[in-house]
Image (cartoon, rainbow, N blue to C red):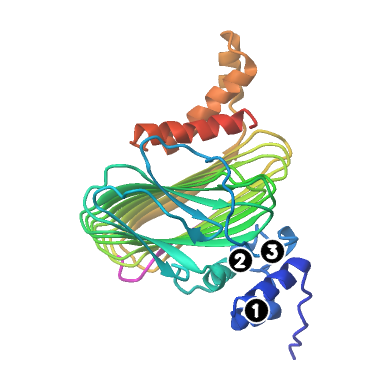
Amino acid sequence: MNVAFPVRLGPAENTLIEQLNAAGAADQAERLAGAGLPTRRVETYHYTDLKTLLRSVPPLAGAATSASAPALEVPGAFQLMIANGQVQAHGTAPAGVIVGKAEGSALTTRDDVIVRLNTALAKESLVLNLDGSVDPVIQIDRRTEGAAAHASSSARIFVADNGSATIIETYSGSQEAHLANHATYLDVGANANVTHITVDLSAKASTHFATVEYQIGENAKLRSLVIHAGAALERTQIFSRFAGEGAYADFTGLNLVNDGQHGDITLNVNHEVPNTASKELYKQIARGRSRAVFQGKIVVERDSQKTDSKMMMQGLMLSDEAEILSKPELEIYADDVVCGHGSTCGKLDEDWLFYLVSRGIPKEEAETMLVRGFLEELLDPIEDEALNEALKAIVDSWLLGK
């Protein structure tokens, strides 16, 4: 006979339950009270045990009354801002861009605690409709401002058939112990070409959760890049669905973690139609006593013949205390496919380091050169020059310990 024991709830769970009830989400509150936050026994959270890692939750955020300095300047970009979950006023939109907002979260229903919390607590979504070739980079600047607060934000982006756009989302705010839970739904129309970048630059004391859902249409091209370089606890989870034949996507990402930080990128790629292709390349750099996690799963459905998909994780440990964890997975139900995955992890090449130092380059500078070389294939494909430089500046800042 199986006996169900009551779940012992911690302070973070009790606060979340109170917040869900206050938001009118009694069903979600009851569900969280019954199951608690996920532990390492839940496969998708095996390396990111939220019950242990999430010790407390700050009060729900009110309207932002102040704004910190921008965490990332992208010259020439069209700027949009969501502060403490609320869509802010913006300037004149460029040609092909229609900006609006809608009630509630943009995410679809999923059996995932971060998704459920966002769906229950996000009050509104920024809505972007992009048509034609959108020239300027679009930057969605998401902030959590003021005293420590729990904020949920959401954005819903539609790129029309044959359209093209580059979109960067940045997450930052004041230097407080915020908990931010962000959501993005991005629909890439047929024959569209989209670059989508998310960058966490939150305060070191904060917790950052982000969920991205991609819907990729026929013959569409998508480049996705995730960069973690901020919060103490970071988790970005990506759910991608190939919905049209001939589509191609590059999924890339980078965990930069330092002392005490825990960064997790979790990726799910579903090939649901024939003749689609994807490449997944994720890199992790850890130093000090830190942990970087990558979990990636490619699912090829039964009718998805001629799928071509390859996943790779590469890790670089800059200290003996650092920890890098990787779990690439394949689930293949079709028989005429080309799929594979790999995972490697190591330290800086001592031979290359010796070579550079022996030619008069100081050791720290030589190490920085090698790390930059390690990351080139992630950043070089970003074609917009100003954006490319801004992203490289994030890496340089992290290498300098800022």
Mark 3 or mark 2, which is nearer to you?
3
Mark 3, residue position = 59
The stretch of residues the image draws in magenta is 295-304
Q: Residue furthest bottom?
A: 1
- Res. 326 visible in picture: no
Q: Along the horizontal axis of the image, is 302 left or right of 179?
A: left
Residue 182 percent location from the top left of the image: 52, 59
Q: Along the horizontal axis of the image, is 248 left or right of 228?
A: left
Q: Is mark 1 on a helix, strand or loop?
A: helix
Mark 2 burial class by Cα count in 10 Å: few <14, some 14-19, many 20+: few
Mark 1 burial class by Cα count in 10 Å: few <14, some 14-19, many 20+: some
Residue at the spot 26% in from the left edge and 60% down from the top edge? 189
Q: Does the magenta stretch include residue 303?
A: yes
Q: Give the amino acid type for the residue marked by disc 1 in the picture.
A: Asn
- Indicate whether 63 appears above or below 251: below
Q: Give the amino acid type for the residue marked by disc 3 in the picture.
A: Pro
Mark 2, residue position = 43
Mark 1, residue position = 21
Q: How far apart are marks 1 and 3 (CA)?
A: 13 Å
